[in-house]
Amino acid sequence: MEADAIAVDSTELKLTELLKEVNVDHSHQFSKLVDDTVSAIKTSIDKIPNDFKVTADLASRFVTDIGADKVEFKFKKPASVKIGGSYSIQSIAKPEVNVDLIIRLPKECFHEKDYLNYRYYAKRCLYLCLMKNYLEKSPSIDRVEWSTLQNEARKPLLVVYPAAKLVEVPGFFVRIIPSAKAIFSIAKLNLKRSNIHNLSDGTALLATPKYNSSILEDMFIEDVEFINNYFLGWKELREALILLKVWARQRSSIHVHDCLNGFLISVILAYLASKQHITNSMKSTEIIRITLNFIATSELWSRGLYFPKEGHSNITKEQRMQLKESFPVVISHPFGGFNLAFRMSRIGFTQLQNEATLTLRCMEKCRDGGFEEVFMTKIDYAGKYDYCMRINLKGKKEVFASGFCLDDECWRSYEDKIHGILSKGLNDRAKFIQVTWRNTHCQWSVDDGLSVLDKVPLFIGISVSTLEKAFRMVDIGPNAESKEEALEFRKFWGEKAELRRFKDGRIAESTVWEIEQWAKHLILKRIVEHVLSRHLSLSKENIVVVVDQLDFSLLHGSGDPISYSGNLLGAFDVLSKRLRLIEDLPLKVSSVQPLDSAFRFTSVFPPEPHHLANEKHESLRLNKLVPSCIQPLEVMIQLEGSGNWPMDEIAIEKTKSSFLVQIGVSLQKMWGMTCTATEDNVDVLVSGYAFRLKILHERGLSLLNKEIGNDQAKRIPSADKKLFIRSQHANMINGLQSRYAIFGPVVRLAKRWAASHLFSSCLVEEAVELLVAYLFLNPLPYDVPCSRITGFLRFLRLLSHYDWTFSPLIVDINHDLSQSDGKEINDNFLLRRKGQGENGQSVGSAMFLATVYDKESEAWTGLSPSGMELKRLVAYARSSANLLAKLTFLEEIGPFRWECLFRTPLNNYDAVIFLHKDKLPYPQRLLFPSEVNHGTHVAEGQASKCFQPFLLPKDLKGRPEELRNKLLVDFDPSKCFIRDLKQEFSTTFQVWHDYLGGDVIGLTWGESYPSKKRKHEEVVVEEEYNPCKVLKAVGEVGKGFVKSIYFLKPPKLMN
């Protein structure tokens, strides 16, 4: 209870600070800025002469495009000018600081039938055009721009930036919004009426509810007292409104024209207050929770929300029926005939309910009441949706073939059309499909007309229902007997439809998406491309689906090596069975467990079967490159229990070696398997793979399992402890991979990214696996990712946004950690931070990853990343995440391409070492040849002839045994070189490398690098340190492997 109280206090404190940050202080200076700007606008309007003849020439393209006629009028002064919006109820939320100025259009400028055929819209625009001309002449006004009301191009508005600036509210502007109060008869704008007659072509006129509602919006835009009255004098309600605005703005999927905006949030709050669902005694947090719960679960949405008027309903049954038939979501104005939520689509509302549900879950399950997830996390399309796509429609006249504006705008109609096609094509594969064309957000002027509003691509976000459905290769349609349905199916799918007989005897229409197992994530892309190309005549070049753009980083040749995993598991199965069948051992093999990441599908490059590692000799094709190296895969074996093991640690290790040698001899004798033994390892070649055997000593295991006294635990041989931890980790990650099929590809991308930016020394493979596991186990405020690029983006954001300084990251894969375990982890974390504070921040790891098997974060982040390494990691992750999100929305422009995510900038190092590409053990893994454009060329070396990554044709001749002897198991000159560098120059510089096979090594000078003076035996000796000499010594260490060394920055000399 005490902990809960502390958590509540912490949340309240954070909310208070957030409110201080986003709330606008209505100070004298701010009020004066607003008043002066409004006064300047009024003065400019007053300068417009009365009866000035306004014609279509002021915005000829706009008038022509919306199809209006009879638009001339004589200018009259506005009937009134008054401030409205959030400013009037003191609920502006930063950073969008603006004031709405409502200009009531004079009735004299309009004819009583101007509600017909877009005449009102044309005159409204022309009135603003004339105002703009005069506003731009005012010295008090910096500039005037065009914008739109809720992305509705037919309803432009003016944005006025004052010349005067206030530091507290940067970017402040005034929006001029026209009001049409009392201009037209409300009855003429009945939802069942058609008010667009010039496009009928003799056919029956269709009702225009959206068109009519859009005009009604202008007529009722001033009548907001029924909302504002609740906020005046109710501080907590205003705070709740501001916080809900922050919440909505952080969610791109709902803060959009067909869903939610600040005004609708205030309407919903006012409705709940009118029904006494929220009261004056409540805190703002409670109001927010009730509001979100109402949005997510209330049944009232199905009937519509109706404001009471003076104690009785003012809405007739007929009006309710009209509203429900015309709109999916109804929030009725007290007048009764106008729906305040007329723009909200059914899809938009579904998204809103989903976000409200997820937010409530965050508040319940996340730390500090979900403050970070609810208010501070930006949930954009790239992070939220599994598949994002852009459709380029620039110059596509079919979009507005029937006119730019009918009942709704052509862009909104096109959104609906695409949504319908995709919903039918994807069927149960997709949980959510959001189609959004924010086409008026670009720099636009009414002078350009409406035809230019196709510059910005249309954006589609798809959330997958389940991976099993998304990766389904066959869709079964109607039976052959259902003629009409089968005809409709064929009409929709075209040449992809085919009649098939299935195993159950059924004959039905179907579509088949044949694809390799590793490429199943492309099925959805192929479906989208097919249906959009077929029904919208779009070329594939204009359909960009963000799904496979990063696959290049995981491919070996033309395919993904993960496709060999079946062979690998088969080879392991053979080895496991044979190990258990060995009879001539003093202790039988009781269990065999794979440890390598290749077995759990998280290895970036799982090994491919090697021709020389097979039991049976295969004839080798001379035209195929045969690698000279093979990666060993570690396998842990346990033996039957025995009390005869020695007690001495060294003796135990020697006994293990004896057992391993005996196992190798037995495998060779019984099955003719090739085994090689060293003092430390025994490697076995099986079915094209090399397995490295390790024995876990049962006494060490029993000590760890019983968790007995610390002194005894410390005496457990470190080899046994490491093996046990690795086995626990492998088990847990393997279990997680079986639950989430996309987990493996996300981990592989994350590992590839970390290695590409030379972080292999400070972020080990297992740490990356745990970081990605955290995303899947704690997805809030999102759903669990179902695509590799979305998961990868969230990994980058986790790295860059997590509070590593003050919080341990706890990964509880199987929900094994109790409350006391959590307390123990936090205590361990605080103890480490305290020790770092006493010894200096650079001591020890700055990242704390805790699991059930490692509560002290010693296994994978015990020593690294250090504070400096983590700082670099965070900076690179932030930069990569921003670029990835940008590439999702925009075309590849200039140097910013997908490849840049894996290309590390070498100018961030003090020196760089280039390696001979043809001496790397796996040169085909190299993504890009590294290059540097500046720095001093210090050393250059010739390539050694002692090692070739591929066996030459002359080496492939001879008996099978001789050929196998040429195979190098676990040989990697890069690892050897880096090990030597760390030994020789441990205090001189830090080594940054790519363990996957990069051709460059980065060096940064160590903090303890050469001081100007060194004390030794109380004698001060002046020493001159020449970095170039040091780098030449590095070249000597890597002779034959190092191609060249560049010196970029000198070390900072310390006194």
Image: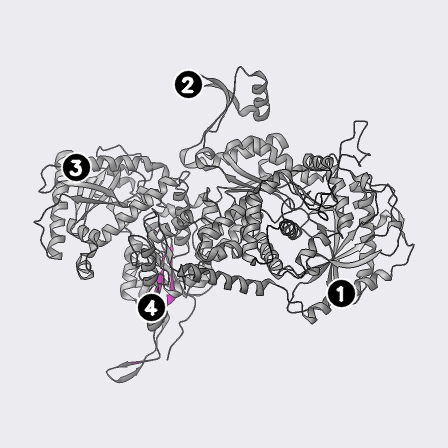
Q: Which mark is nearer the camera, 4 or 2?
A: 2
* 629 left or right of 129 in image: left
Q: Give the residues in magenta.
A: 990-1014
Residue 986 percent location from the top left of the image: 30, 66
The residue to which callout 2 is attached is 504
Residue 384 percent location from the top left of the image: 52, 46
Q: Residue 843 shows which numbered tag?
A: 4
Distance between the Cα atoms at labels 2 and 3? 41 Å
Is residue 942 visible to the viewer in this orientation of the structure? no
Foreground residue among 692 and 264:
264
Q: Are marks 3 and 4 in contact (CB under 8 Å)?
A: no
Q: Does dot 2 land on a helix, a strand or a loop?
A: loop
Using a 10 Å C-alpha cutoff, classify the residue at mark 2 as few (fewer than 14 neighbours), some (14 to 19) or many (20 or more).
few
The quadrant the C terminus occupies is bottom left
Q: Quadrant of residue 603?
A: top left
Q: Earlier in the sequence, mark 4 or mark 2?
A: 2
The residue to which callout 3 is attached is 580
Q: Earlier in the sequence, mark 2 or mark 3?
A: 2
Residue 1010 magenta-drawn?
A: yes
76 above or below 499? below
Q: Earlier in the sequence, mark 1 or mark 3?
A: 1
Distance between the Cα atoms at labels 1 and 3? 86 Å
The residue to which callout 1 is attached is 37
Using a 10 Å C-alpha cutoff, classify the residue at mark 3 as few (fewer than 14 neighbours), some (14 to 19) or many (20 or more).
some
Outermost top residue: 481
Residue 619 percent location from the top left of the image: 26, 32
* 263 left or right of 104 in image: left
Amino acid found under the numbered disc labelled 1: Thr
